Amino acid sequence: MKFFYNPKLIVTSILLLIATAHLYPQKNNYSYLDAELVGISNSLNGLAFKNTNAGFQNSLAFKNNFQQKWGTVNLPQQLLNDDFKPWESEKHFAIAVGEVALLEFIPWALAKWFRTWEDPADNWANVSSDTWWSNLQKGFEYDGDNFLTNNFSHPYHGAMFFNAGRSNGYDFWESSAFSLAGSAVWEFFGETFRPSFNDWIYTGVGGANLGEIFYRLSSMVTDNRATGSDRVWSEIWGSLLNPVRGFNRAISGEMGQNFDNPSWSRPEDFLITFDGGTRSIDKDGDENYTSKEVEGLFTLNIAYGNRFKAKKPFDFFGFEFAIASNQPHFTTMNSTGFLFGYELEQNKHRFDVSLDFNFNDLIKEEISETDTVYKGFLFGSTQVFPHLSSKFPIGEKTNVVTRFGINGIMMGSTPNDYYIDVEGRTNDFGPGVGTRIYAAIQNGIWNYVSLMYYGAWIWTQSQPDNSKHHIHFLILEAQYPLTKYFSIGFSTGVYWRNSYYDSYEGIINGVEYSREASDVTKNHPIGRLFFRTAILDL
């Protein structure tokens, strides 16, 4: 293991990157994320640059003489409290339900009593028995939430619901029921609007993905064996990564106890890398390639666990977060996590199913005296990915890794070329299906060369709903390691979209809307130069 920087700074960088997503003001309450295609490649394919055969070495973080437990301070076994029963070793149903109720109440109360409404009739928090009964009778529909709300706000809220179960003794699958149930309660009883099917999927399923990642990272950072200031910082970082778990550790008294860390919370493989560089993208999407934009791009990647050894949900996961120098700054948040699978040939071939979450946006708003134009592209999804993973040795430490599978998109978002919603939505969303192919030459923690194709059909369910989209990503990346933990590289690729619109006439949100039938093709070439450094390699 190589430990380059202070672990406090590592966790701080993760939190600051995530926190900055809330700091950049967006017009029309809409935030466009600059989705880096290198990021899409890494994230959609499980961050395949990690050497899954890496082992432990002695370091400041893992102490071999104390059973390789985490922390700069590790108490000997005889000083631990053997009689203390960890909170998460038992299920606490009443506490979990109470926390879900509190997570429902806080945003509802803020909207009802503290938010200023220009027209009080627009206050969706003015629920009553009449609105509840109406919602139960009418059932689900697709609403018009914008890209940021659907693909970031809802999943984050769902992650809190999920951890109300997870940090109260429930496993991944049981905790997923908490995120789905919490979202359903909100949809039927927390708003005057009809319950939204897309909100339920983004919150319930996307929340399970992000929630388990936050839970495992928080458990990894928190050290039950540490004392003094190291223990204080351990609890602070863990609580910032997972506030619900931090709350439960506080009320249960775990923050003040010394006891052993659960073995599962210390993965045998863990890698954090940081990328910095420039990206060039053509925003127009026409065949002339005349609207090139160059910007700085900074990306944090986390690879947790070993995909060829994963047995339980999220024993292996990848997480990526990126910010750009140009607007919009918050550009990418992608993740993938192992759900279940089985080994076909030991350490060589596996069939797995993963749960993936994607947030990528390269659309830029351009305002003139006469018009507002949106250029670029976006892609967001909550999906399952059944796939075959293989590893073929071609040298002592070099392998060709491949993955091939089906994109089962429960909800996916892609641009709409004609319609702009009153809420700032410029995208269509709906379910879809497609294919994904990935191959790389891998040595240690580096992919020397990788190639990825991602394709999907998305059938629009949001209004106006009579369209379908065929989207494609093709990305080639190469990098050369200058040292064991520093490389330079480039990537090149293209996003292209074929959209098919039927004619439409109707009323959407009280406004008449019509369009003629048309077909639209967009092509967006992308290039990137970058350096990559391994911050932490376990």
Image (cartoon, grey):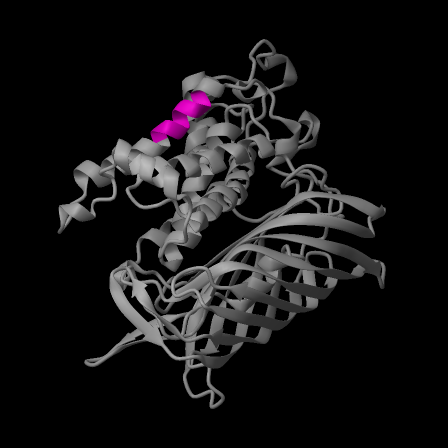
Query: Measuring 50% from the left and 17% from the top, which residue is drawn there?
Result: 257
Q: Which residues are magenta?
A: 95-102
Q: Main secondary structure of the magenta part?
A: helix
Q: Residue furthest bottom?
A: 288
Query: Measuring 27% from the left and 31% from the top, which residue is drawn there?
Result: 129
Query: Measuring 65% from the left and 45% from the top, which residue is drawn there?
Result: 338
> How many marks are shown on the rendered structure?
0
When the figure is inspected, residue 493 is found, relative to residue 130, above or below; the finding is below
Quadrant occupied by the C terminus: top right
Q: Position of residue 455 (x, y in %)?
A: 61, 68
Q: Nearer the viewer, residue 358 or 499?
A: 499
Q: Quick check: is 96 in the magenta stretch?
A: yes
Q: Position of residue 242 (x, y in %)?
A: 45, 36
Instruction: Report whether residue 235 is seen.
Output: no
Q: Nearer the viewer, residue 529 or 184?
A: 184
Q: Quick check: is 37 in the magenta stretch?
A: no
Q: Quadrant of residue 232?
A: top left
Instruction: Report whether residue 30 is seen.
Output: yes
Q: Position of residue 437 (x, y in %)?
A: 69, 65
